[in-house]
Image (cartoon, rainbow, N blue to C red):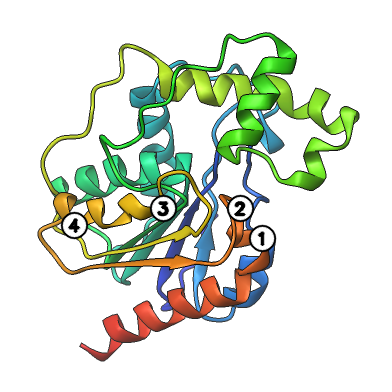
Amino acid sequence: MNTISSKPQLFLLHYAGGDRNSFRPLLENLHSYFQIETPELPGRGNRMAEPFLKNKKEAVEELLDQIKKTRQKNVPYLIYGHSMGAILGLEICRIMEENGDGPEYFIPTGYPGPNIKNNAPIAGLPRAEFFAEVKKLGGLSDEVMEIEELLDFFEPVLRADFGLLENKENKPFEGKIQTPVYAIMGKTEQYALNIRNWKNYTDADCECHIVNGNHFFINQNFNYLAQVIKNLINITLAK
């Protein structure tokens, strides 16, 4: 049973290969400020026994269902997503807006917004080539890439998540959301210099920031990220 609280809500959407525990350091920084919800796609974490999803539409519907079940409409909320979580989060923002309950802010990290990335599909590559591409894209931290047992564990989840995002049935995002966007990318990410592309996908305020680090800059910047999120909810509550 959900506990009713007056604290604002924060929905954290995990990256490819991630699960509901991917942002644990962020939870430790923010649990006293927010009711934190961590939706999780099947095939990992607490849902290891469930089959993977096949396309972006299925993933958005699955996360939306979890968000709606825990959403308390009497309090403001934010959506944060990293990489795949940012891709799916944008779609979720639009649907929540259409339902009359859009978030106060959308915080995408590790993603320059729609219709920029133009990488060849990698989900079906042989193992060595697959992980070479994952490393190039920043899809796993350097620490994980050095341990074969961890690669064995992450390989099916990563292949499924990249396959989900690469599915030819996926429709490109079109139009704009009405939610303010606060986007962050790591300086050495492939498309970091395209981050201002986010301004094309919201009719509200849009701030774009580049920080030191690679695709997983968040792992060294959880304190910074927590402060950003706290600042955004403070702006909301001060209105």
Is residue 87 shown above or below 227? above
The residue that label 4 is drawn on is 199
Q: Please tell me which of labels 3 and 2 falls first in the chain.
A: 3
Asked if labels 1 and 4 touch by Cβ distance under 8 angstroms, the answer is: no
Residue 180 or residue 199, whichever sits in front: 199
Q: Please tell me which of labels 3 and 4 falls first in the chain.
A: 3
Q: Which amino acid does label 3 sit on?
A: Ala
- Location of residue 90 by image quarter: top left
Is residue 231 shown above or below 101? below
> For the residues carrying marks 1 and 3, which lies nearer the camera in this image?
3
Asked if labels 4 and 2 touch by Cβ distance under 8 angstroms, the answer is: no
- Location of residue 105 by image quarter: bottom left
Mark 3–mark 2 distance (CA, rounded to whole Å):
13 Å
Asked if labels 3 and 1 touch by Cβ distance under 8 angstroms, the answer is: no
Mark 1–mark 3 distance (CA, rounded to whole Å):
17 Å
Mark 3–mark 4 distance (CA, rounded to whole Å):
14 Å
Q: Please tell me which of labels 1 and 3 falls first in the chain.
A: 3
Q: What residue type is labelled 4?
A: Lys
> For the residues carrying marks 3 and 4, which lies nearer the camera in this image?
3
The residue that label 3 is drawn on is 192
Q: Please tell me which of labels 2 and 4 falls first in the chain.
A: 4
- Location of residue 136 by image quarter: top right
Q: Can residue 49 be seen in the rendering of this structure?
A: no
Callout 3: 10 Å neighbours few (<14), some, many (20+)?
A: many
